[in-house]
Each structure stands twice: as C-alpha cells, then as structure tokens.
Image (cartoon, rainbow, N blue to C red):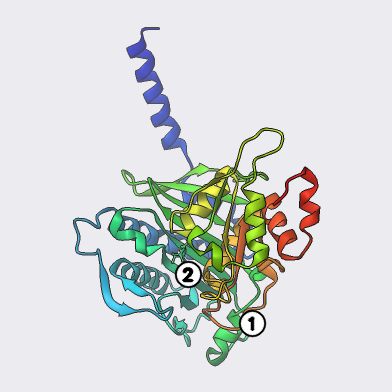
C-alpha cells in the first residue's frame, strides 16, 4: 500500500480510536454499581472535581498570557508564600463542589479551617472532601509540572455541623475515593474508588477526559527515586544508609537507580506509578514530622498506590492506618514500588541486614 495511503489510514484509525475512548463520565456511570457508595450523588461529586480540574488546567496552560503568575502577597496556613494559581485552584474547587451540592465539608491546604458546604441543608450530604488545590505551585512561574490532589470520605449518619471535622478526620483506609490531576505535558486525571486505578487524559479539543490509562499497576521494581538530596545531611543515619544502599550498582547487571525530583509530588508520584520508583520525604530537623500533609497528600496517594499494587509508609507504619489528629498534620513519607518501600522500612527499623544479602556493603 503506498505510504501516504497507509499514513492516512493510520490517522483515521487513531482518530476513530480516540473518539471511541470512554469519557470519565461514561466510565463512572458504567461502573457505578461497583462503587461501594455508588449513588448518583457520588458520580456527580467526581464530575464536580473534574469540572474544576478542566478550569484549573485552562488557567495553567495560559499562565504566561493571563495575569495569574506570581504570588498573592499572602502566606498560607503552611507558612508558604501563596501563588496566584494556588488561590485560583482553591477557588475553582470550592466553587465546583458548592455548586454541585454533593459534599458537606471541604478541607483545603489553602485554608486554616474546614469550609462548611450547606451545613444545614435539607439534603444532608454525606461526603467530606480534602484537597491540595495546587501541589508544587513553586513550579507554576517556570512552566514546570504541578498537580491537584483530592480525597473523599463518607460522614457517619447523624453527624452534627459542630463536630464535622472530628468525624471527617478518619484513617486513610476509610477513604471512598482519591485521585489527582497532573498538569504536565498533558493533563491527566487519575483516581480510584477501591476498584483499581484508572487514568483519563484531557482532550482540550472536545473538553473531555478520555480513558487513556486503564487499570494502572505500579511495577514492583523501580528505575527512579525522588528526594531532595540537598537535605541528605539532615536525614537520619538510617535514611542515609538506605539511600547509599539504594544507589549501589546492581551486582548482577551493574545498572544503578536514577534520581528524578521535579519539585511536585504529584508529578514524581505519577512517573513512579507508571514506571516504578520511590518518592521519599523523610523527617529532618527542619521537618520533624516530614513535609507532606497526611489528609490531602499522603493519604490519597497511599490509597492510589496500594490500589495499583504499591506501598506507602512513614517508615514504621502503613500510611492508611495512621489516625489523624489535625487537618494540616504532616507525616514522613516513603511511597511507590512495594520492594523499594519495604527496603526503606527495613533500614528505618534496624533490619537492614535483610537487605544486605546481595553482598552490597554501604
Ligand atoms: P522541597 C511541594 O511544596 C511539595 O509539597 C511537594 O510537591 C514537593 O515534592 C516538595 O514539597 C518539595 O519540597 O523541600 O524539596 O522543596
């Protein structure tokens, strides 16, 4: 067949393939009966988050043109300089969830306290949503990747507005849904409801998230690790020993793990989820409890990584088993391929001898 004809056939096939891809909404409706808490309300909640994600993506993609770069001049509850896009992302998520009317409480990295949503409404909504509206926002002004992370819980029957935070601060194992949006070379929406992990890539030409990464599984071995090596002298001796072991050459193949640290947890996590790898942000004198926040960074990503066959730990405990005490509490975090997180735990728990069987010496 002449090459120009085969090329056009390929193009037609790709176009047909793309148009036949399932949209996020179709996927949620198609699988609604599998969601443990499947009601139309839950499907609409996911739709609300995806609408906000499209608007945030549009702002990010035009940041150099719109007046959305730079800082707001304020500092958020974390003591971090708030970027304009942080505020925009927070605003769009709150607006979408309020308009959708499917949740009763919001916990945001950008807000000191929880945000009640129709607390005394007639229809007592059941969902509490926690989110980091724009993770890695220090990257926004330099055209590097950023992301949104969200986590969803069901509130117990009969909850009262006065104690909504107390009943929302549940262990990560109680999440009914979690996901992230990675605003990278493309915009991808990845989520789980406890039945595996699926990824949807935004097609701006039709304004739809299309199923592009069905049933994501994280490889057990990793080719990359992500941590801020500038802090290595601040890490505990156990973490430093682990990193020395991690960087050793493989005795059989001579290959070595590579370092990639984007400055956006979502982006490092997404790459490691697809290719295998480890992200670690250990405790240090500057971050005695680690830096990542439990409710809207560690827990949702721990739910996702376990659903994809990986592991998430603070070095001693499973992240999803930690009992939260406050909205913005932090945790040390080791997350990614099962074999790498397990190795980190062995070093932190004084069992490094179990890992030294391959003849490596530190
Ligand atoms: P450091 C962004 O603020 C973030 O929470 C993660 O997205 C990122 O991996 C980390 O902090 C970067 O922190 O201390 O290495 O600059």
- Furthest residue to the front? 361
- Furthest residue to the top? 1
Say which quadrant the N terminus sits in.
Answer: top left
Q: Nearer the viewer, residue 60 or 96?
A: 60
Q: Is residue 47 left or right of residue 164?
A: left
User: For residue 290, which quarter of the picture?
Assistant: bottom right
Q: Residues within 10 Å of mark 1 (few under 14, many from 20)?
A: few
The alpha-carbon separation of the residues under discs 2 and 1 comes to: 23 Å
Residue hosting label 2: 131
The answer to whether residue 297 of the structure is visible from this angle is yes
Residue at left 51%, top 58%?
229
Residue at left 38%, top 25%?
12
The location of residue 44, given as percent across then percent down, is 48, 63
| Res 15 label | none
The location of residue 21, given as percent across then percent down, is 47, 39
Residue hosting label 1: 157
Residue at left 57%, top 76%?
288
Q: Residues within 10 Å of mark 2 (few under 14, many from 20)?
A: many
Between label 2 and label 1, give the one nearer the viewer.
Answer: 2
Question: Does residue 318 sit above or below 223 in this rendering?
Answer: below
- Furthest residue to the bottom? 162
Q: Secondary structure at mark 1?
A: loop
Mark 2 or mark 1: which comes first in sequence? 2
Question: Does residue 316 sit above or below 335 in this rendering?
Answer: below
Q: Secondary structure at mark 2?
A: strand
- Count of marks overlaid on the render: 2
């Amino acid at each position: 067949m002449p090459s120009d004809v085969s090329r056009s056939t390929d193009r037609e096939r790709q176009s047909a393939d793309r148009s036949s891809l399932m949209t996020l909404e179709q996927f949620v409706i198609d699988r609604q009966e599998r969601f443990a808490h499947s009601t139309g309300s839950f499907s609409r909640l996911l739709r609300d988050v995806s609408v906000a994600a499209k608007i945030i993506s549009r702002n990010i993609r035009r940041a150099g043109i719109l007046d959305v770069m730079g800082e707001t001049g304020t500092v958020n509850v974390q003591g971090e300089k708030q970027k304009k896009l942080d505020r925009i992302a927070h605003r769009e998520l709150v607006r979408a969830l309020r308009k959708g009317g499917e949740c009763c409480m919001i916990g945001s990295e950008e807000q000191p306290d929880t945000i009640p949503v129709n607390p005394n409404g007639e229809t007592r909504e059941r969902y509490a949503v926690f989110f980091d509206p724009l993770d890695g926002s220090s990257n926004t002004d330099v055209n590097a990747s950023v992301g949104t992370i969200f986590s969803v819980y069901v509130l117990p029957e009969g909850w009262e507005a006065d104690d909504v935070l107390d009943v929302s601060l549940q262990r990560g194992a109680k999440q009914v849904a979690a996901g992230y949006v990675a605003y990278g070379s493309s915009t991808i929406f990845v989520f789980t409801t406890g039945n595996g992990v699926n990824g949807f890539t935004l097609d701006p030409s039709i304004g739809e998230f299309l199923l592009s990464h069905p049933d994501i599984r994280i490889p057990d071995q990793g080719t990359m690790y992500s941590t801020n090596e500038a802090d290595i002298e601040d890490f505990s001796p156990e973490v430093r020993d682990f990193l020395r072991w991690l960087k050793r050459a493989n005795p059989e193949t001579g290959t070595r793990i590579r370092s990639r640290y984007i400055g956006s947890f979502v982006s490092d996590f997404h790459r490691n989820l697809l290719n295998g790898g480890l992200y670690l942000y250990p405790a240090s004198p500057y971050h005695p409890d680690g830096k990542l926040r439990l409710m809207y960074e560690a827990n949702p990503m721990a739910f996702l990584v376990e659903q994809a066959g990986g592991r998430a730990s603070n070095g001693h405990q499973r992240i999803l088993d930690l009992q939260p005490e406050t909205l913005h509490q932090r945790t040390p975090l080791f997350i990614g391929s099962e074999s790498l997180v397990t190795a980190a735990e062995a070093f932190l728990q004084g069992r490094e001898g179990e890992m030294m069987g391959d003849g490596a010496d530190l």
